[in-house]
Image: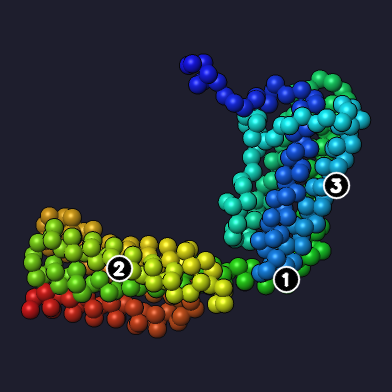
Amino acid sequence: MLAHLLSSSKRSFASLDEKEILALAIASEEEDARIYLAYADNLKDQFPSSAKVFEDMAEVEQTHKNMLIEMYRSRFGERIPLIRREHVRGFYERKPDWLTRNLPLDTIREQAEAMEQQAFRFYTEAAKQVSDASTRQLLGDLAIAEQGHEDIARMLGDKHVTDDVKTEEDETARRQFILTYVQPGLAGLMDGSVSTLAPIFAAAFATGDTWSTFLIGLSASVGAGISMGFTEAAHDDGKISGRGSPIKRGFASGIMTALGGLGHTLPYLIPHFWTATIVAAIIVFFELWAIAFIQNRYMETPFLRAVVQVVFGGSLVLAAGILIGNG
């Protein structure tokens, strides 16, 4: 029983024979072709030029798979063993389609480049561990083919994605990132940071009790986060506006709302009232300036205007909370 639990269901790479190594290469080329087609499907609406690159790369992978099958048939016959990446320890793995959907364009490009580099290293290492001359030559040819894939990818990129197109696609990706994450996250951060100032500091100065203030701030922050998250997710499904997944936007808005309130709530875990209040006020200062920076950096709001809107406005809310608490 213990031996069964300790044993691995995966084969070691060193245990594969020539037939299994070639079968593994065939399966890998087929999987990579399907991954490139999945990338193309994900990109075709917003980035048609890059989608065409991945369609062409998938055709290259299919061509190499067919070449490998012919090589296998000439050496070992018609029956190809069933062996895939996940069957071999230490072999490079690929993520399933549902984990690669909606990835940023730059991430997809980086993953495609990594795929080719990993395949090249696999064939290079495989060639080192065999002694049969024909098998060594075969694996060397496969390594050269995989290394050539990188050149093919660059040529396809030059063919379909010119500098102007790449600039346009990068700008589209940046705009989508802002609409899906930055804009709702910023709205949440502003709501959580500013709207909770008055009740938290009013409670602090009215009660003088740090623990009660912490509980009030915690409930206000979490409640606001849940409310903002559901509001953002239900407000727009993103299909017409192009703002992206409502779930992603809801999480961005809800989490940032909660964090905005918790930033100046957590200091009230400090038992000493004035120490906690001073620390909370310092954190508020940095929160407001951070919001102004994000507005200027991503929303292209003039910095001075952002400062007036956020820092000055937030300071007024803070002062109002203190005055109410002392009233």
Residue shown at 46% from the left, 72% from the top: 183
Up the image or down, 260 lies above or below 269; here it is: below
Q: Amino acid at mark 3?
A: Thr
- Badge count: 3
**Quarter of the image that includes the C terminus:** bottom left
Residue shown at 88% from the left, 28% from the top: 77
Dot 3 or dot 1, earlier in sequence: 3
Q: Secondary structure at mark 2?
A: helix
Residue shown at 76% from the left, 44% from the top: 30
Q: Residues within 10 Å of mark 2 (few under 14, many from 20)?
A: many
Residue shown at 23% from the left, 72% from the top: 197
Up the image or down, 311 lies above or below 18; here it is: below
Which residue carries the number 3 mark?
63
Pick out the residue farthest to the right.
74
Which residue carries the number 1 mark?
165
Q: Is residue 85 visible?
A: yes
Residue 80 falls in which quadrant of the image? top right
Whether pointer 3 and pointer 2 mark residues with C-beta atoms closer than 8 Å, the reply is: no
Q: Secondary structure at mark 1?
A: helix
Q: Amino acid at mark 1?
A: Val
Mark-to-mark CA distance, 1 and 2: 42 Å
Residue 267 falls in which quadrant of the image? bottom left
Which residue carries the number 2 mark?
224
Dot 1 or dot 2, earlier in sequence: 1
Q: Residues within 10 Å of mark 3 (few under 14, many from 20)?
A: some
Give the left or right position of residue 195, taking residue 270 as reference: right
